[in-house]
Amino acid sequence: MSNEQTPAEGQAEEEVVLYERRGPVAVVTLNRPQYRNAQNSKVTYALDAAFSRAVDDDDVKVIVLAGNGGHFCAGHDIGTPGRDVDESFERRAVIWWDHTRKQGVDRRLSREAEVYLGMCRRWREIPKPMIAMVQGACIAGGLMLAWSCDFIVASEDAFFSDPVVRMGIPGVEFFAHPWVMNPRAAKEFLYTGDRFSAQRAHELGMVNHVVPRDRLESATLELAERISGMPSFGLALTKMAINQAEDLQGMRSSMDLVFGLHHAAHAHNAEVSADSLAGLDARGM
């Protein structure tokens, strides 16, 4: 067993996601620190390849999702040189047509049903425990990555935000807000677009543990190793049971509804301003 970090299987030139085995733990690391680990489609598919690799390895008991550099993830890529919204990728999460051949709502919905909502749902059902190790910014699309995991361990300097209501959009595509915190807190989170500190997120139940920055990695790995001593099949069944309980409470059907509202907002923005993002860029957000 090697602790050497390697690009996730199937990645192209830039190593946007790294994969490392540490005993029974697979550490999957977002690796675009120069862009605060903004998530483009290339990152999405590299993550999926890394998670699949971890699931297929019987010696891996727990998966940790991390972000290289000062921030976990500043959200979807809406403005870096690596933005690849016009590129076609193999579709793995949903069976739908290639978005690049379509226009309007068809184009946006086709892509986002796959690379955002579909992938996060796929990762939520991974049969191994997933822990998000969060430092710095966890914004919008970054929330979706963390919320796809079972636990969140955050450093004291971490903060969480979903500012997309500024675009007139009712939250990110993987709309888990009322389940990862309470509904009143979710309304404040979205209505204000404010940052919630790691401590506030912990008080609301969104974060499991808050630790000093210099203890983030060791505390997360200690938790992962403790969990790895449990029977893998028992962990998988327990995860399935809790996920099903959330879905019976309406989580999945609510996401379907809000995904439609999300795209109604994109279409409205494109109609009134000729820009589905209402003219806002990453700096504006």
Image: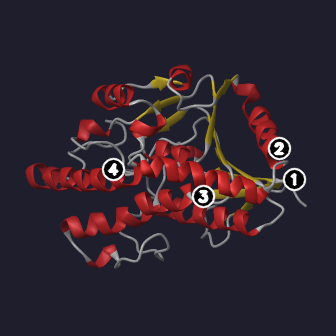
Residue named by callout 2: 225
Q: Is residue 162 in view? A: yes
Residue named by callout 1: 23
Q: Earlier in the sequence, mark 3 or mark 1?
A: 3
Residue named by callout 3: 16
For the residues labelled 2 and 4, the Cα–Cα distance comes to 34 Å
Q: Earlier in the sequence, mark 2 or mark 1?
A: 1
Q: Are marks 4 and 1 in contact (CB under 8 Å)?
A: no
Residue 256, position as x, y percentages in the image: 32, 56
The amino acid at mark 1 is Gly
The amino acid at mark 4 is Ser
Residue named by callout 4: 254
Question: Helix, strand, or loop for circle 4?
Answer: helix
Q: Residue at x 57, y 28 (%)?
A: 158
For the residues labelled 3 and 2, the Cα–Cα distance comes to 26 Å
Neighbours of disc 1 within 10 Å: few (<14), some (14-19), many (20+): some
Q: Residue furthest right?
A: 1
Residue 68, position as x, y percentages in the image: 65, 44
For marks 4 and 1, give the one nearer the viewer. Answer: 4
